[in-house]
């Protein structure tokens, strides 16, 4: 006798006790990702001492954009450990749009402060890997926002692809943008400013911290959007 059974790799082969342990571990990892994003934003903001110079606002805006707003904008769709798990999906979508709009505003503001600081100091632009990655990240974020508009308004834009496929493209591109943003944040920790502010074990700890939310986000998106297989028996 043949029957089709929907298959999901999450929790496969686990007993009830192991399954609940797995669920709580996933919840704990999402909560730690929330705390890490907020902690990184606060730490970088304190280190930059906003208001002391034009440049001081650049790390504040960029960390708020990518470490906090973008992370929360993705993790709010997580079923485990999200503070918005009790909200409807429609409410989550609105919060997602709001947070991603804040990402663009904060990132553009941070870029403006950096350009102004360079111009005042009469220093050349785009000489470091961090600056090049930052421009690429901001450009990719803008393109991802356009992709999000395509998901929201497929009919007015006369798009031929189906909405589920557009959502898959949007999620995949969003993951790539987030990973690019993570690389950009990590590269900032090799800058002269950051290495002069943080040294020793603290520097290594802050260097590794952005990687944890990236792993959680990657796991969330791949589990939600990877094609499900079917098995026959």
Image (cartoon, grey):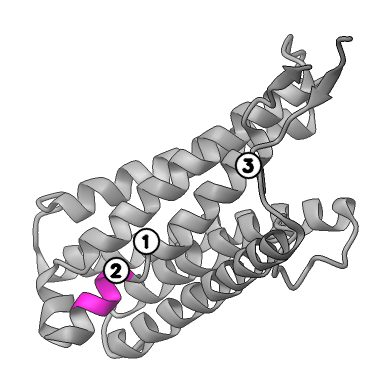
The residue located at (15%, 50%) in the rendering is 129
The numbered mark, 3 or 1, whose residue comes first in the sequence reads 1
x and y, in percent, of residue 59 in the image? 33, 73
Tell me the quarter of the image containing the N terminus: top right
- Dividing the picture into quadrants, the one containing residue 136 is top left
x and y, in percent, of residue 233 in the image? 79, 17
The residue located at (28%, 65%) in the rendering is 114
For residue 207: magenta?
Answer: yes
Residue 181 in the image: above or below residue 151: below
Say what secondary structure mark 1 lies in: helix
Neighbor class of circle 2 (other Cα within 10 Å; few <14, some 14-19, many 20+) is few
Residue at the spot of label 2: 208
x and y, in percent, of residue 113 in the image? 33, 68
- Magenta segment range? 204-208
Q: Which mark is residue 223?
A: 3
Give how far apart the Cα atoms at labels 2 and 1 are.
6 Å
Residue 180 in the image: above or below residue 61: above
Residue 135 in the image: above or below residue 29: above
User: Which residue of the protein is positioned furthest toward the front in this rendering?
Assistant: 1
Q: Which mark is residue 211?
A: 1
**Which of 219 and 176 lies nearest the eye of the viewer?**
219
The residue located at (87%, 67%) in the rendering is 86
**Which of 54 and 98 lies nearest the eye of the viewer?**
98
Neighbor class of circle 1 (other Cα within 10 Å; few <14, some 14-19, many 20+) is some
Q: Between label 3 and label 2, give the one nearer the viewer.
A: 3
């Amino acid at each position: 006798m043949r029957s089709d059974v929907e298959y999901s790799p999450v929790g496969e082969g686990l007993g009830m006790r192991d399954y609940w342990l797995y669920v709580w571990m996933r919840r704990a990892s999402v909560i730690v990702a929330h705390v890490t994003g907020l902690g990184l934003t606060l730490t970088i903001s304190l280190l930059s001492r906003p208001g002391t110079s034009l440049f001081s606002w650049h790390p504040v805006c960029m960390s708020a954009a990518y470490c906090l707003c973008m992370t929360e904008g993705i993790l709010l769709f997580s079923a485990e450990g999200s503070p918005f798990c009790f909200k409807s999906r429609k409410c989550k979508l609105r919060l997602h749009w709001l947070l991603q709009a804040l990402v663009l505003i904060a990132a553009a503001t941070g870029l403006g402060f950096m350009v102004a600081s360079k111009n005042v100091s009469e220093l050349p632009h785009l000489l470091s890997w961090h600056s090049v990655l930052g421009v690429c990240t901001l450009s990719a974020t803008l393109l991802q926002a356009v992709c999000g508009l395509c998901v929201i308004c497929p009919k007015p834009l006369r798009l031929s692809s189906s909405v589920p496929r557009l959502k898959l493209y949007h999620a995949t591109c969003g993951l790539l943008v987030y990973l690019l943003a993570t690389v950009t944040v990590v590269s900032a920790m090799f800058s002269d400013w950051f290495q002069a502010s943080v040294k020793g074990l603290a520097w290594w700890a802050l260097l590794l911290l952005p990687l944890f939310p990236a792993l959680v986000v990657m796991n969330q998106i791949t589990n939600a959007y990877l094609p499900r297989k079917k098995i026959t028996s």
